[in-house]
Image (cartoon, helix red, strand yellow):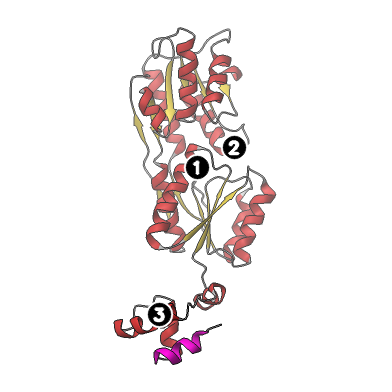
Amino acid sequence: MANINDIAKRAGVSVSTVSRVLNNNPYVSESKRAAVQSVIDEMDYTPNRLAVDLIRKETRNIGVIMPYNNNQAFDQMLHGVLNRSVELGYTVMVLPTKYNPETELNYLNMLKSKQLDAVIITSRSNPWELLTPFTKYGTIVSCEYTEHPEIGCAYMNRYASFVEAFTLLKDKGHIRAAFTTARGEESNSTKLTIKAYQHVFGDLLPEYHVSNCYNIDDGVRAAQQLLTTHLRPTAVYANGDEVAAGIYQYTRGAQLLVPDDLAIIGQENQPVGIGLGLTTVDHRLVQVGEHAFNLAIHKSTDKIEIPYRVIVRQST
């Protein structure tokens, strides 16, 4: 099997020149680069990537911790990461946790074992106090805001967006508004949603909060539950456009009008919401993923806020 010394000898160059070619170093003349590449092709040489990584002291592998890979919000963030990784020649490893704390910590150990250069956390199950010690082994970037100086983050102001969505409903005369969330009150996003609701509407009736909502079927379930309560809500803020679409579907099937009988706001400006004319809160998660990737490869601890936008359509 050919090695780097064989290639250097046949190409008539130094071993260091071959190494520069293999590592895409720009400081090699085109004539020497062509000669080395010709011999590499002729000898069908494949470099030992582990050895190359050790020389470069980087793997060019980025891990993305995400609870699920069939959720539109997390898929949008991953899409942003992949956009940049393809442009810059990095490999992305998707690390699903299903919100298992132990699984999450196991993935972070991949920084310690030098399998990854950086980890991007789209959503977490462990407290930051357990995660920040891993920064001594590699870069950690969050897709939610954190005050920890060791962690860079690309984030949106979720609380402000929730307040704006609920205020939009209140300004349109709704005093009985409900909402859906993915997780229960153990989730930071859910806590912020409840806090924003109470800021705008005051006390929250327990029946006006439906959790475990991820897709259209969950939206149908939520609508069935909400629209059969004793004091039926007149508006719903859903935690995703797919969930909102399920609410829309059930509402129309029950011979109710949108928005006259039930106003609906979705989230993340997804195709199904655009098709149904749903008002939505767009957190611009693709851009969040792109900026998170940039922070990861530059080993940055900057805090970058991505502005959200509320897109008003026929459903309100």
7 w.r.t. 219: above or below: below
**Residue denoted by label 2:** 187
Identify the residue at the far left of this view: 30
* Location of residue 31 (image quadrant): bottom left
**52 over 151 or under it: above or below:** below
- Report the front residue among 83 and 131: 83
Task: Please name the amino acid that badge 2 sits on.
Answer: Ser
Q: Classify 257 as above or below 80.
A: above
Q: Earlier in the sequence, mark 3 or mark 1?
A: 3
Q: Nearer the viewer, residue 105 or 191?
A: 105
Cα–Cα gap, marks 2 and 3: 49 Å
Q: Is residue 121 left or right of residue 308?
A: right
Q: Which residue is mark 1?
A: 74
Left/right placement of residue 127 relative to residue 82 reads right
Q: Is residue 238 magenta?
A: no
Categorize mark 3 by other alpha carbons within 10 Å: few (<14), some (14-19), many (20+). some
| One can see residue 300 in this view | no
Q: Quote the CA–CA distance across marks 2 and 1.
A: 15 Å
- Give the extent of the magenta segment: 3-13
The amino acid beneath tag 1 is Phe
Q: Are marks 2 and 1 in contact (CB under 8 Å)?
A: no
Residue drawn at the location 45% of the way across and 7% of the way down: 255
Secondary structure of residue under mark 3 = helix
* Sequence-wise first label, 2 or 3: 3
The mark found on residue 21 in the picture is 3
The picture places residue 243, in percent across and down from the top left corner, at 50, 26
Residue 220 location (% of width, % of height): 54, 20
Which quadrant of the figure has residue 229?
top right
- Identify the residue at image location x=47%, y=17%: 249
The picture places residue 126, in percent across and down from the top left corner, at 64, 48
Instruction: Classify the position of the C terminus by image quarter.
Output: top left
Q: Dot 2 surroundings within 10 Å: few (below 14), some, or many (20 or more)?
A: some
